[in-house]
Amino acid sequence: MRIDYLSKVGAAVSAFFAPMPFYLSNGQNSHGELAPTKSVAIIGAGAGGASTAYFLHNYLQPPQSRYIVNHSITIFEQSDKIGGRCAAFRVRNPGEKDEFVEVGASIFVKVNRHLNDAVKEFGLKTKPLDNELAAIWNGKEFIFEESQWRFWSVLKGLRRWGIAPLKLHRLLKKTQSDMLQSYKSTETFDSIVAFAKRFQLEKVASVFSDIFLEENGIGKLYTKEIVEVATRVNYGSNLNEIHALGALVTMAAEDALQVQDGNFQLFEGMVGRSKAHVRLNTKVMRVRKVAPLHKGAEPRFEVTTASGHSEIFDSVVIAAPIHSTNIDFDLDLPPQPKVNYRTIHATFVRGHINPAYFNMTSADKLPSHILTTNTDAEFTSLSIQVRLSTGETVTKIFSPEPIQADLLDRLYSSRTWVKQKVWKAYPRMQPIPASLDVDPISNGAEKSLQLLQEQHVFGQQPHQRQSAASAAWGKVEIVPGVFYLNAFEPLISAMETETIAGKNIARLLRDRILGHCPVEKIPSS
């Protein structure tokens, strides 16, 4: 989630995004014999929308296809930038190279194959973050501080939490192995429950984290002081509010990376390679089904923008949370689960941290990342993003509520400026059973079953909720020809998983356009 406050995409970029010429199977231009062009509209230019365009374009030309398939991709984005919840802003550092500070989605890891492949393909540079020290603050004191000597940090951890970290590591390895299998698969999935079942993720997604960890012998002290600290900063959730898959993914953040000068460049690169028509500052107001070109043909869709301009497309991809788009969908949509998104306040401060707030005498000894337990802490996390040549720092504070001036007065001895951004950051990833027809696998699933029965499903009356579990997981193709990318997010929400969801939709669209499922070339690595 980052905001690029300074970068604007102008006429030069529009030229860069110019649509590709059309070719027939012999590779030659032939304007007199073109096959019908298949047109796709993508609403939203975040990680999901950008990756859908990127993978679809790749699938419709060699080497993935035997010939270049005539197609046109148009991306509608209501803001002035590409990247969605991934954005950054520039910080001037006198006498030094300018720095970019991530506002939203800050990190990815080495096992995130799609993002790392994009780094290489687009010639981007990354910077590791694992060498920065962290500490855990309970509102009154630091209960744990990492050491520059990794071995010493491990010993301190074993002394405080015993072998709980080793037990959790085994659980992480199993879940990570299951998720990595998706990279080796060429299958398509018409629902998120189908994806979860295929890669054995549905059980960990059907139980609350606190119950799952207790059932697997992870000590409560470790779950409260480490695992919950991580879920609070990554998903704004305590352990009794998030399913176990979300907690495990949060804890699998080894070898953390950022793209130098902003992660948003990953998605700018994807959009550029897709050769899509890009409509920035363009709000979509209506999507409606229109008559097919001839009897027996697939329906088409009219997309109308706030300016009143309308275009007809063969398929539409909704790459934004459907209930927050305020789009009039005249599509006879079936009832959609209303997924609530957490509001996260990001506050950025340039100034001098007051060490006395943390019971210290010198700010030089403060750790780079201060994470908090679910106690009396007045914020979720405070991280030093840039150390300026003036002696000041630029820090980022995450909190569930706006940071008030009184707290800033106590946290900082002086401030040059303060910037704030409010995000609907990620969904409340509460447990959702894959089916209401199976026996609960644990107390956690039983608890989530009750939650489901009470859950409001958008567009349904209580007596209509025949399959709340299926609805809550969500369908990918919500009506024929219309695909919903963010149906994936109640399962897991991250930059990489947005690209996984985008790739799945690109495969579905490819198969629809080609009329068959081709043999797909998968990298051996």
Image (tube, helix red, strand yellow):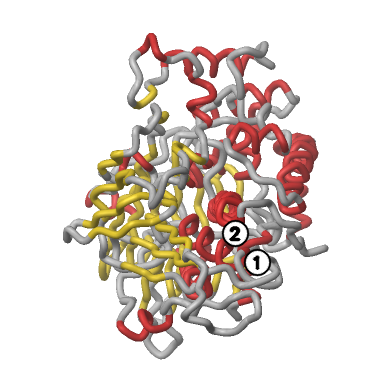
Q: Is residue 268 visible?
A: yes
Question: Residue 406: percent from the left, percent from the top?
Answer: 23, 49
Q: Which residue is mark 1?
A: 116
- Give the vertical position of 419 relative to 341 (above or below): below
The residue shown at (63%, 60%) is 256
| Marks 2 & 1, CB-CB < 8 Å contact | yes
Left or right: 455 with respect to 66? Answer: left
Which class describes the residues within 10 Å of circle 2: few (<14), some (14-19), or many (20+)? many
Which class describes the residues within 10 Å of circle 1: few (<14), some (14-19), or many (20+)? some
Q: 456 or 30, which lies in front?
A: 30
Tag 1, which secondary structure?
Answer: helix
- Give the vertical position of 323 relative to 385 (above or below): above
Q: 168 or 330, which lies in front?
A: 330
Q: Which residue is mark 2?
A: 108
| Residue 129 in which image quadrant | bottom right
- Give the vertical position of 74 relative to 447 (above or below): below
Question: Residue 99: percent from the left, percent from the top?
Answer: 44, 77
Q: Marks 2 and 1, how far apart in space? A: 9 Å
